[in-house]
Image (cartoon, helix red, strand yellow):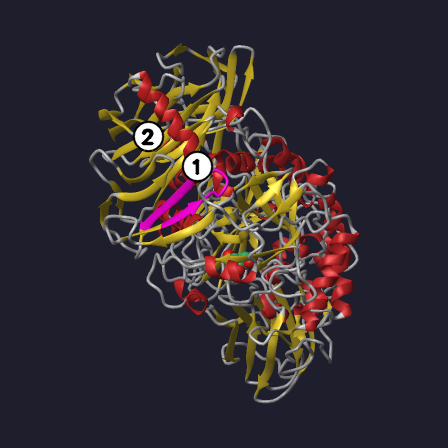
Amino acid sequence: MRLTSFLSCLLVQSLAVNVVSSKQWPLHDDGLNKVVEWDHYSFKINGERLFIWSGEMHYWRAPVPEMWIDILQKVKAAGFNTISFYGNWGYHNAKNGSLDFENGAHNFERLFEIAKEVGLYVLFRPGPYVNAEATAGGFPGWVTTGAYGELRNNDTRYTDAWTPYMDRMSQIIAKHQVTNGGNVFIYQIENEFGNQWLDRVKKIPDLVAIDYMELMESSARRNGIDVPLIHNNPNMNTKSWSKDYSNEGGNVDIYSADHYPSCWSCDLTECTGTNGNVPDFTTFEYYTSFQDVAPTQPSFLAEFQGGSYLPWGGPEGGCVNNTGPDWVNVFYRHNVAQKITAVNVYMAFGGTTGIPFPGVGTSYDYSAPISETRFVGDKYSETKLFAQFLRVARDLTKVDRVNNGTTYASNSAIMTTELRNPDTNAAFYVTAHAFSPSTDRSPFKLDVSTSAGRLTIPQNGGNIVLNGRESKIIVTDFSVGREKLIYSTAEVLTVSIQDGKPVVFLWLPAGESGEFLLDCIRIPLVLKKDGCSNIKFKQGRKGFVTSYTQSKGSCVLQFETGIRFVLLDRSAAYDTWVPSLSNNPFTYENTTVVVQGPYLVRNVAIEKKTIDISGDWSEKTDLEVFAPKAVNSITFNGKKVQTRKTLYGSLIGTLKASTHSVDSVKSSLPALTSWKVNDGLPERKAAYDDSKWTDADHTTTQNPTAPATYPVLYSDEYGFHHGNLLWRGRFSGAATGVYLDVIGGAFSGWSAYLNDKYIGSWVGNKDSNGALELSFANATLNTDSENVLFVIQDHMGKDLRGGATIARGIYNATLVGGGKFSSWKLTGTAGGEDNIDPVRGVYAEGGLHAERLGWHLPGFNDAAWKKGTPDTGLSTDGANFYRTVVPLDIPKGIDVSLGLKLSSPTGLHLRAQVYVNGYMFGKYIPHIGNQITFPVFPGILDYHGDNTIAVSLWAQDAAGASLTVDWTVLGVVESAFDPGFEADYLRPGWTDNRSDYY
Ligand code: GAL
């Protein structure tokens, strides 16, 4: 370029800025503090705008504090700037009057420290109701009896019940707010309680709901919460709690809504009521609703689908394909097109525990970006591409939605939304198929308006392509340091500024062509060629337009100002990490370095001339690092890597292939063959001593649904809320049978015995109740003395929302042919609400004989037991309990994800539960569920010691039951995370007070 034309280029630039004028929107802080503010566009934290990009996890579904760092580092490495946590009232408050924020994961304060250390803001959602597919939506069992009213209202009985929990939660969270030097910046009140209106159209308020919201808000404020309060409406229609929408009471500071466009469940029929009967992969409109309900606030999706849960009966492994990488690509960009600037992805990591969930099994993998195995794959990588773009697209935090339509693109199948920053004139053109489910390959050119004028891009041949379920955000006047990318048809992956000079990473699927124009720039040097072909430069009005075809890998161009462009294909982009040298959640460009190659990069530090990278890998990996010039050597997890500097300033080296693999770890694991066995159901015998059991003798109940027969046989009234329940009813006389209607929740089951003899079972289906009339014909009835009817029932957790008060127990117990029960007894979890295992917590065990006596715990002495294996099992009805103790010694330096794989012959009606060191980590009902792989967290497993593995096997009929239990190795990588941490305190052993609970 001649000097004169270059000068004229600079002149054009100075004339071209600031073409858009915009409405002035009020900035709020609701008088709380100046640390968190917000307006029509976005949140501002410490005066700076941030696109809130959050991911959800539940600590109580991952009850191993030493493991949380692994998850939070992965969340941060994916590019999230915020993490969201639900509380769980029931987990912390097993008994009215006793709170536990101390034992094991009940003390979750380490989460705040880790969030601070890795650089994540925190959204906290304590409840009191959370939903979350947790039993009773997080309500403690004792709250669900009916004695506290309907719940979720201003009934003083209910208010008094939740207040201690919510007060304590607020006090703990308050210490970690941004206003106190922590990272918590918003706080959610209740969950999906969109009940402000009795009649929304006529705006008739629901005064009870308002009072309830106000009570919770004042508890939060009273206990030190001074960050904004938010509420997540269950959908776009409820329009509750927004200050912009009404002056009614109960309004929170910031309105938000939840949405699950592709269903929150693998069973898509669960969502047709909310989403309608739309074709799979349909995107929804949010913009109008947010402008209607909360125009002066950021458009905020406090829950947006990150995957979906696996209901009982759903496919093994969940429905990963419903929300796979293509879904992530299209739906997350779609939200940007809706001018949304705050999103919480539900879930980032779902986790798993034995906590009972109504309708779902023990897995809460959720097909989330980080799987319950803790390992990551393409969905995580695709999430990362989007997130890394968001992080550097700082101008996106203040955009007007200028227009949208199909005329921007030369192909009418393409819908484009133009978003423009009124201050900088940067624009974002979100392109997608107008019919979102389309799988067509659609090439097009796009009309954009830039500081170089109106352009149709690409200008010099080729097309932008949307290949099926894909969306692209085309940027114009995008700031890269002090320079401007006038446009790029390849998407921006990231920008890192080193030694004051930007390195810009653009990505495209291999085979596609890209074109970009950097403001006022001359032809660059092509310093690495092999990842691109056809590189061309053509002088345009404001500099040289670069065009190229992307192939596998990357190529590098360096411009005269020192700015470098790295052009890469999708798979190279998947392997690109942007760790930061600072723990500021804003993750400024001048604090990042770029590391390419490994499976995971967790963290970096620069010490003089050495960069230390901590991360994970397994195969031989080519490592490439873009770091400041002064850095000339690399250590990876503390070990030196042979490096050399490239022509364009990066460092390259190689990580050697790991000597460990899934196979090598698998072959080193101890065989699960040497088991001991004992009778798991002695209570079926008439002579069983139930003198210490609880009398079930209530003649009245506060439950909204009265039982059909008395005494009341609802377990919650007697303090038993979880796991298996055992009932014994006595009667005399000449009954010929019994009619039993047992409520256990969907997919529950029960078996009944008369005087030692099996008389029948309900094996379970979708119905919450199982009702059967059973004959006594095959049993021996004592006509002159007492008979004992024994019923064992499974308990699948309590229902959600209004269903939380639906009882578990026996709704109807009627003798057929005459006579009445003279008494009933019941047992369940040892100690009932007293929670004698405070570390594992109230949800960890139920009322099986083995659980009550602690046979599942480490250290129980089974010396007197016989040898016997679950794969031999039982040849008839009944239950056995098996134990084995096996040592593990996982090699140091690697992260290993282990699980148990269960199988059984088809056609059996069995219910099995698997315990690892006292934690129930697998509920297996093969005639109902398809889950066969049960991941177990490190810390639950001791990677350098003995592990007690136990199985309860309940055969629901005379065909008996057997179960094969084997290890499965779900991932092996060289890692900076040590899963062999010391965590004995999480695995307390058997104590002799257990013997009282026979
Ligand atoms: C939302 C709810 C969450 C969870 C989700 C489905 O409606 O707020 O708690 O239940 O649905 O997984």
Q: Which residue is mark 2?
A: 517
In front here: 296 or 626?
A: 296
- In the drawing, does residue 437 fall left or right of residue 743? left
The image shows residue 696 at horizontal and vertical percentages of: 71, 73
Marks 1/2: CA–CA distance: 18 Å
For the C terminus, give its image quadrant.
Answer: bottom right
Which element is circle 1 on?
A: helix
Question: Looking at the picture, does residue 109 appear above or below residue 667?
Answer: below
Question: Horizontal and vertical percent for residue 801?
Answer: 59, 66
Quarter where residue 984 is shown? top right
The x and y percentages for residue 266 are 41, 58
Q: Image point 48% across, 37% down: which residue?
A: 424
Residue occupying image coordinates x 74% and y 71%: 155
Residue 389 is tagged as: 1
Residue 706: say if magenta.
Answer: no
Q: Is residue 565 above or below residue 54?
A: above
Q: Is residue 724 visible?
A: no
For the residue pair 104 and 604, the one nearer the viewer reads as 604
Q: Position of residue 80 (x, y in %)?
A: 51, 39
Q: Residues within 10 Å of mark 2 (few under 14, many from 20)?
A: many
Give the amino acid type for the residue marked by disc 2 in the picture: Leu
Residue 696 seen in the figure? yes
Q: Amino acid at mark 1?
A: Phe
| Left or right: 656, with 611 as reference point | left
Q: Which mark is residue 431?
A: none
- Range of magenta residues: 417-432
Q: Quadrant of the N terminus?
A: top left
Name the foreground residue: 43 vs 574: 43
Counting residues from the start of the chain, the first of labels 1 and 2 encountered is 1
Q: State yes or no: Cβ of the residue under disc 2 lies below 8 Å from any atom of ligand 1.
A: no
As drawn, which residue projects farthest toward the bottom?
818
Report the residue at 42% width, 33% height from top: 15
